[in-house]
Amino acid sequence: MIRIFAVFALLSISSPGLAQDYPFQGLAADIAVNTLHNTLLNATLHSHGETEANDDAPGKAGRSRYDRDPRVTERAERQFLDFIHKTSGPAGAATVKAEFAKRSPVELWASMVSKDGLKAGDAVDAVAGYWILNWIIANQAHDQEFSTGPVLDQVRAALVGSPRFTRLSEAQRQELSEVLMMNFLVQQAVYSQAVTAEDKDLLRQLSAAAVARFSNEAGVNLRSIELTAAGFAAR
């Protein structure tokens, strides 16, 4: 068991207003908000048999992977920064842009989560990291120890079992993944600084925001599920 996503901010971001979710573009939004969340919830909390049936299906494991295309990365970063500009103003966008200029968001994300068994190039890892981080923030569970392996298995079963996800192009899988990575970086940076400063008011605000985010997007109450040795489970 490992302590994942140790509180360590790689981005110099402190404004809680930046810890919002960038609304996904096009089909990525449909997958992330509708199909993915509901499929994952059902597959992991209610039907272990269904999950097991999907685990070893021939050829399915590779359907979540992608080779990185710089053009997709450029588009995703531009749209993300536009969103930050609209929601947090030019100063907030300038801060995030400056950090991304020092090191690419994908490299930053990978350096933060690699020790926890997550890697770039597979949508499963980006989705799992996003779910885990938001669960941690919602439950203020940054000191809890557990393994990412079971969650990766749950997410993979959900994705390869979703017809709409398997119809995504390689570019769309990349865009979905990198948008989740950028959200992860900003949310983790703000949460990390709140933990370090022992800012209880901000921690409560961020927790409430994570709960509201998943409730609105997915109909999932992050406080009603827990992370166990077997992955996500109902409390």
Image (spheres, grey):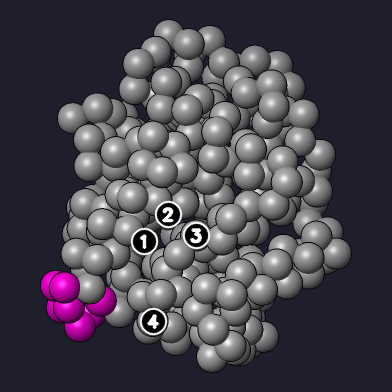
The disc placed on residue 116 is 2
Q: Is residue 81 inside the magenta stretch?
A: no
Q: Residue at (67%, 44%) from the top-left corner?
A: 28
Span shown in magenta? 194-201
Q: Residue at (64%, 58%) from the top-left corner?
A: 178
Q: Tell me the crowding category of disc 2: few under 14, some 14 to 19, or many 20 or more residues within 10 angstroms, Cα based.
A: some
Residue 152: % across, % down: 48, 37
Tell me how far mark 4 sits from mark 1, CA to CA: 20 Å
Tell me how far mark 4 sits from mark 2, CA to CA: 26 Å
Tell me how far mark 2 sits from mark 3, CA to CA: 23 Å
Q: Quadrant of residue 187?
A: bottom left
Q: Residue at (52%, 73%) from the top-left corner?
A: 87
Q: Nearer the viewer, mark 4 or mark 1?
A: 4
Q: Tell me the crowding category of disc 3: few under 14, some 14 to 19, or many 20 or more residues within 10 angstroms, Cα based.
A: some
168 to 174, vertically: above or below: above
Q: Is residue 4 left or right of residue 108?
A: left
Amino acid beneath label 3:
Asp
The disc placed on residue 15 is 4
Q: Which residue is mark 3?
A: 21
Tell me how far mark 1 sits from mark 2, CA to CA: 7 Å
Amino acid beneath label 4:
Ser
Depth check: 189 or 146 in front? 189
Q: Quadrant of residue 78?
A: bottom right
The image quadrant where one finds the C terminus is top left
Q: Which residue is mark 1?
A: 5
